[in-house]
Image (cartoon, grey):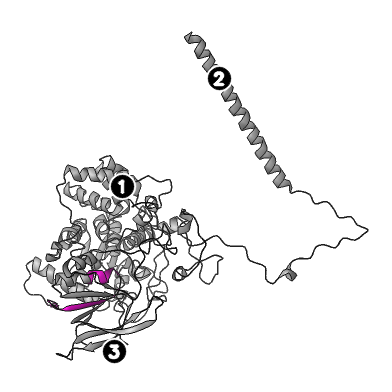
Amino acid sequence: KDRVLDWEEVYASQTKKSQQWHNWMQTQTARCMDCGTPTCHSPNQGGGGCPLGNRIPTWNQLVHEGEWKRALERLLDTNNFPEFTGTTCPAPCEEACVLGINEKPVAIKTTELAIIEYGFSKGWIKPQPPLSRTGRRVCIIGSGPAGLAAAQQLNRAGHLVEVLERADRAGGLLMYGIPSMKLDKIEKVLRRIKLLQQEGIVFKCNTEVGRDVSLGDLCNKNDAVIMATGATQWRDMRSTENRQLGNVVQAMEFLTATQKKNLDTEMGLKKTDVTNYDVQDKRVVVIGGGDTAVDCVGTAIRLGAKSVLQFSRRDEAPTGRSKHTPWPCWADTYRVDYAHSEGQAALGRDPREYLVQTKSFRPSAKDPSKVGAVVAATLTPAGKEKSTVDYPAELVILAMGFTGPDKVIDPQNQLSRDQHSNFKAAYGEYQAESAPWGNLYACGDCRRGASLVVTAIAEGRDCASRVDAMLMGTTTLPRAAPLAANPTFYQMPQKGMEQAGLVKRHLRKHHQVAEVSDAFERGLLVENAKEPEAEGNLEAEPEPPVVTKTEAPAPVAAPPAADAQIAAMQSQVTMMSLCIGGLCLLNAGLVFALARSKK
């Protein structure tokens, strides 16, 4: 309840650690079993596992042994920004932890954050500029997690890297899309930006590609251009009645304005040209059930809202794993996020309102130009409408997700897009398809759609490796695509091909499967294919061969391969029996000789 009184990060870590903290970390990391098949390492099709391929058991063991610097080195081998993933990541690695099958998983995310912050406190994190420069120029559009990861990797390879950002501060989603209580802007984001600048990366803010500079000019002036703009095109409710009313705003507009105002105030900037959202003693409704909606709930509570409700069309999730999200998938279970617990403590109830669908917005009686209530239908678990309820609201925030990158960067529609409006570029190659320029690449959310910070970092690292290989003919940068490196864990069906036993993601919940064991195979995309059943009834069975009186039926011989296999197994059993018997006799002789020597 006290933490809603400030904007301090809820995961803030103190620099001076007590012995009790070290004891707890040693105990927690000791729970890691160093599995023979560490399912936390690599992502699976069910959403579990680390997209970066972090060597989790390795640095768990090093922390347990007190080797913090070596643990930091192993962590930075695969992750450029552990301070970001250690705070904002939902920890899919913990969902795939083997220990999580029958008890709480290892606190991997907490250990990751502890390692990087311990490294900063000891002064181990220093700028690493390249020893020499290649002279090749690379321009990166967007300074979010994907763009920053690609920039650091290519800069370390010796290329001249320039990052363009249309906002007034670098960081992209990390700066304005995630609130300060979830990710500290000065102590974490700006600290990392300064390190990247000291390594030689150039940042140009207030520069929007498509308006201030064209994409074609960038491709002509640079050896390579990477689009890492993110999925910024939000979903709207344009067809909903009275959507045009005032105080019905998008989530990113609300979060960006709030974070910018807080940062300007904290850094001593008096004149700020941002929208001021005054929700003191007002009722707020947030429409959406994702992480962005949760951030809006936490922000509204800190702004002094009288009440905050979060609408969700789905029912409350079960407390245990459901059949359609078995281990090591991301479990579809009931979770309490930081803003939900704050709403319970500060406002007296969980902000979430389940099985609610917005129908229209009602004007306020005091000011008809602004919203006064949300008309919503309550639903049954099957999705049918039961009744209509009016929810009073002076501010409505739309947080319903994103539909790919906006069109500012490509006003002439020269770039190909997929069915989800994302830039079309093959996974693992990242080269923009059907683009007029051969040196144009796309990675992160603008290529794959809205996803996690850890996934964006992985794509930025992997895209940097492909760009470096294109520029130099070969590369020393590591690949960061565990999906391509581990085909056993990830089997993507070919387009237009039907595969037996394939269960598509959007049908997994409705797919009825038999009870199976708690084995790792349940996380795979393709299940064991069943034998196709013969069509028809007994008439479709093959008829037995007709035997005439003049010809006697030939005896059916046993398959020679089966006989040879059985004979080999019998000989192995005989040899094992003889060896065991010989060892028993030898043991008895040694015991007898030892007894005689003692006498």
- Judging by the rendered image, the residue that carries numbered circle 1 is 74
Q: Which residues lie in the magenta part? A: 271-296
The residue labelled by disc 2 is 588
- Residue 205 position within the rendered picture, expressed as x and y whole percent measured from the top left: 19, 70
Q: Please identify the residue farthest to the right as the structure is shown.
A: 550
335 up-or-down from 100: above or below = below
In this rendering, position of residue 470 left or right of residue 279: right
Give yes or no for residue 277 being in the magenta stretch: yes
Q: Which secondary structure, mark 1? A: helix
Residue 298 vertical position relative to residue 17 in the rendered view, above or below: below
N-term-proximal mark, 1 vs 2: 1
**How many discs appear?**
3
Left or right of 145, for residue 280: left
The percent position of residue 36, horizontal first and vertical second, equals 43, 45
Neighbours of disc 1 within 10 Å: few (<14), some (14-19), many (20+): some
Q: Quadrant for the N terminus, please.
A: bottom left
Label at residue 393:
none
* Comparing labels 1 and 2, the label whose residue is closer to the camera: 2
* Residue type for callout 2: Ala
